[in-house]
Image: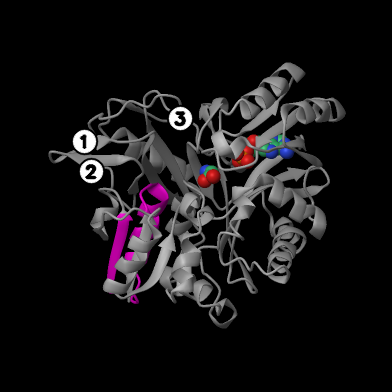
């Protein structure tokens, strides 16, 4: 079958690598892709925002499955257009993607379904927001309602910070994404991510992971899209996974289905493991980046079979996903200046040497300029290794990082530290 993958980051490179391995795949296309994805797919210059053009391409190339990587085209309804025309799609409808596209939508759904999450208020102007802050005290969390490229959340330790976050949102810093906001109770605990596949009815647990959101070692400095990750997250014990499934994921899927917006695709739960059990921090309507990279390194099942079963509403009829017992860990190499002002154009040396011995270097933000691979984004490379322990995967990943010539890049030196410390305890 011919497959079209939408996206251009490290997540999509990992998806392309795995989709290309399937015996079901005849030809893989990627739009717009990147130089790493080009090793596995034919790149096409399609604009995902132009739904008509994507549909025309699918007709012309007899595409049997579209895999949508990033959230923006999902929240924008690309899956609805394709599905409406009979093209199988992996990814939720516009209505169901509100789980990521509107923080207020998700909090209301949790309230209706009795899903454990922090207390909250939805507000539509600065005055109401400031009044709500007084009721919450500090610390408190302020979130722009819509998609804000990972920058719309402030965990405020002081009232002054909280008030500044409110002003930023309602002064228009996030455009339409800040037309509304959510003021939320601060949750305390360790964070972990859990992924489940669903076709709208059947739910299949997929994998766990943890990432490092802060730019600096020791989890310090500004928030980023993620500086590294590992899977599985052993802190999510089988008991905690079962609880997340029964108290959070299943009620979400059932509620959305019963309200006429069945969710089809991957559900990415951000969980806080609090003293009173796992609570939902947020949902994403796509695979995590870089969590996807480490999860797919461990996946032994055919990815096309799994994603197609979600798209065709027959997830209950196929074998559950199988994963290797190994740990996978990825280190993000970012361009100097990330997350604020990443340097563009930094030259990257030959990656073949780093890829020896089972290492995979996924391209996140790269471009080819006159035959030279260069940085073309904040997060540039994802250097990914496996091992019997996190410590072993970490050692292998950093050994590969050391072989990469990327003078204008940097990485954290401590990806996996929590888990390494637990392993050594
Ligand atoms: P998000 O952009 O929704 O992923 O949120 C970014 C980060 O803010 C999360 O990964 C958490 O570390 C933190 N966060 C979000 N909501 C809460 C909350 N209610 N309590 C504590 N931390 C939170
Ligand atoms: N790494 C976090 C995310 O993909 O949202």
Circle 1 SS class: loop
Which residue in the rendered view is the most extreme toward the right? 135
Quadrant location of the C terminus in the rendered image = top right
* Nearest the eye: 374 or 141: 141
Which mark sits nearer the N-terminus, 3 or 1? 1
Is residue 244 inside the magenta stretch?
no
* Nearest the eye: 319 or 423: 319
Residue placed under numbered mark 2 in the picture: 353
Residue 244's image quarter? bottom right
Q: Residue at x 22, y 46 (%)?
A: 352
Residue 303: x percent and y percent? 43, 68
* Nearest the eye: 242 or 246: 246
Start-end of magenta stretch: 7-31
Residue 290: x percent and y percent? 47, 46
Horizontal placement of 368 versus 95: left or right? left
Residue placed under numbered mark 3 in the picture: 413
Q: CA distance from mark 2 to mark 3?
A: 20 Å
Which mark sits nearer the N-terminus, 2 or 3? 2
Residue 76: x percent and y percent? 50, 54
Circle 3 SS class: loop
Question: Crowding near pointer 2: few (<14 within 10 Å), some, many (20+)?
Answer: few
Residue 131's image quarter? top right
Q: Is mark 3 within 8 Å of ligand 2?
A: no
- Residue 357, above or below 335: below
Residue placed under numbered mark 1 in the picture: 349
Q: Residue at x 71, y 65 (%)?
A: 250
């Amino acid at each position: 079958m011919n497959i079209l993958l939408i996206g251009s980051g490290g997540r999509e490179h990992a998806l392309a690598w795995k989709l290309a391995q399937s015996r079901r795949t005849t030809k893989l296309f990627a739009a717009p892709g990147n130089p790493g994805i080009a090793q596995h797919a034919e790149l096409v210059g399609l604009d995902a925002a132009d739904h008509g053009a994507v549909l025309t391409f699918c007709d012309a190339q007899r595409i049997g499955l579209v895999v949508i990587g990033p959230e923006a085209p999902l929240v924008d309804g690309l899956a609805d257009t394709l599905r409406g025309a009979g093209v199988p799609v992996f990814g939720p409808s516009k209505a169901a993607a509100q789980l990521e596209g509107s923080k207020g939508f998700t909090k209301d759904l949790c309230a209706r379904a009795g899903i454990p999450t922090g207390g909250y208020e939805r507000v539509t102007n600065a005055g109401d927001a400031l009044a709500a802050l007084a009721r919450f005290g500090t610390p408190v969390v302020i979130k722009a309602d819509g998609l804000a490229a990972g920058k719309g959340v402030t965990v405020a330790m002081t009232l002054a910070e909280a008030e500044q976050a409110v002003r930023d949102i309602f002064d228009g810093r996030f455009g339409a994404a800040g037309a509304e906001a959510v003021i939320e109770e601060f949750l305390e605990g360790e964070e972990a991510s859990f992924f489940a596949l669903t076709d709208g009815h059947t739910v299949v647990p997929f994998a766990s992971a943890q990432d490092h959101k802060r730019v600096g070692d020791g989890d310090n400095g500004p928030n980023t899209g993620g500086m590294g990750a590992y899977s599985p997250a052993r802190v999510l014990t089988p008991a905690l996974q079962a609880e997340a499934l029964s108290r959070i994921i299943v009620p979400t899927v059932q509620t959305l289905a019963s309200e006429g917006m069945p969710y089809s695709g991957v559900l990415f739960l951000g969980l806080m493991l609090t003293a009173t059990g796992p609570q939902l921090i947020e949902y994403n309507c796509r695979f995590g980046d870089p969590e996807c990279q480490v999860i797919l390194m461990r996946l032994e099942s055919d990815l096309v079979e799994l994603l197609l079963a979600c798209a065709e509403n027959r997830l209950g009829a196929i074998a559950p996903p199988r994963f290797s017992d190994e740990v996978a860990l990825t280190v993000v190499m970012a361009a100097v200046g990330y997350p604020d002002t990443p340097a563009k154009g930094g030259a990257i040396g030959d990656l073949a040497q780093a890829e020896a011995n089972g290492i995979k270097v996924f391209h996140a933000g790269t471009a080819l300029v006159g035959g030279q691979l260069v940085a073309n984004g904040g997060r540039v490379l994802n250097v990914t290794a496996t091992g019997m322990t996190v410590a072993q995967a970490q050692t292998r990943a950093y050994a590969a990082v050391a072989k990469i010539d990327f003078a204008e890049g940097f990485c954290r030196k401590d990806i996996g530290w929590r888990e390494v410390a637990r392993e050594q305890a």
